[in-house]
Amino acid sequence: MFADDARMRAYEEALRRVVTPRSTVLDIGAGTGMFSFIACRLGAARVWGIEPSEAIQVARDIAAANGFGDRIRFFHGESARVELPGRADVIVSDLRGALPLLPYNIPSIIDARRRFLTPGGVLIGKRDTLWAAPVEAPGHHARFIGPWESRPFGLDLGAGLKMVTNSGHPGTSAAGPIRPLADSQCWGTIDYPAVETPDMKGEFEVAARVRGTAHGILLWFDAELADGITLSNAPGKPELVWGRNLLPLSSPVEVEAGDVFCVTLEARLVGGEYVFGWNTRVTSPDGSPKASFRQSTFHGKAITLETLRRAAEK
């Protein structure tokens, strides 16, 4: 993560604006401690880092090697289960992946804001804006979907095809170019100082600008760390460590300029995991239907009857 220079420089500048010699800084999901060390270098009086993985020992060793041991204290565990000796003036975190909708991101920030942040304290990041666009992505389709459509050895692989078309896939350029077919649309905003639920739902209607083959809905986000300090993993921008997420359509759809995409996106945190749903309807400019799909990552998981029975017995 710290090898992403653009990301690290943006976080450094956001911390520089608010850290003072009297500041207590809390780093949630500290990993190997890079945000904690930056806060120390900027002169924070105290820094607390919380990290659930064994990487915390690396952070402790780096802190000692760089003379930060007297100002940094690392806590091993999930932030919601950790008790701190006080409150922090600044809370910094980056618990995102291709989207901010990872199981531990929003719940951790809500909990930390309530229990650990001083009145008037600062959260870094501040806001994430979620974006989507229908795209043409033949390389991604060929890589992730195509093998299940090919009927190798004459086999019907429909069960596997249903699974992969109801799963999110990496939306980076590694599998080939991605071409937006319509203007990007905002489908949600996470305002970290105010958010109270980890769930998200949005919908949009947008007309295709060009002719092409729609293979899926590409998702990404813009991160506002502080006023005027932003990062984006939007298509066409240099790729960040976060990547992007591609939700495939059940089958490709040939579209003409002017055809309309009606899309509903939903993410619900269920049992410690996000379930994503995406419903897509494509119509001609006169409203006549061309395609309609209802998809969910619930159908993208292989679950045996034995597992379901054991879950029902608990």
Image (tube, grey):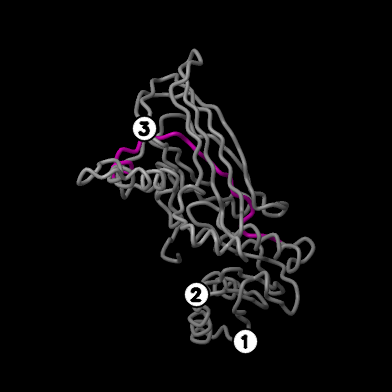
How busy is the neighbourhood of tag 3: few (under 14 within 10 Å), some, or many (20 plus)? some
- Asked whether residue 136 is drawn in magenta, I would say yes
Badge 2 amino acid: Thr
Question: Is 236 above or below relative to 255?
Answer: below
**From the viewer's perspective, is residue 206 above or below residue 133?**
above
- Decide: marks 2, 3 in contact (CB < 8 A)? no
- Reading the image, the residue beneath label 3 is 252
Q: Find out whether residue 235 is within the magenta segment.
A: no
Query: What residue is rendered at 53% in x and 34% in y?
Result: 185
Q: Is residue 307 left or right of residue 169?
A: right
Q: Horizontal placement of 238 versus 200: left or right? A: left
Q: Which SS class for mark 3? A: strand
Neighbour tally class for label 1: few under 14, some 14-19, many 20 plus, Cα within 10 Å: few
State the residue in front, 249 or 52. Answer: 249
In the picture as drawn, the residue positioned furthest to the right comes out as 119
Residue beneath label 2, please? 32
Nearer to the camera, 305 or 77:
305
The range drawn in magenta is 122-142
Q: Position of residue 88 (x, y in %)?
A: 72, 70
Give the amino acid type for the residue marked by disc 3 in the picture: Pro
Across and down, in percent, residue 111 comes to 71, 64
Residue corresponding to mark 1: 70
Q: Residue at 73% x, 52% y: name it.
A: 194
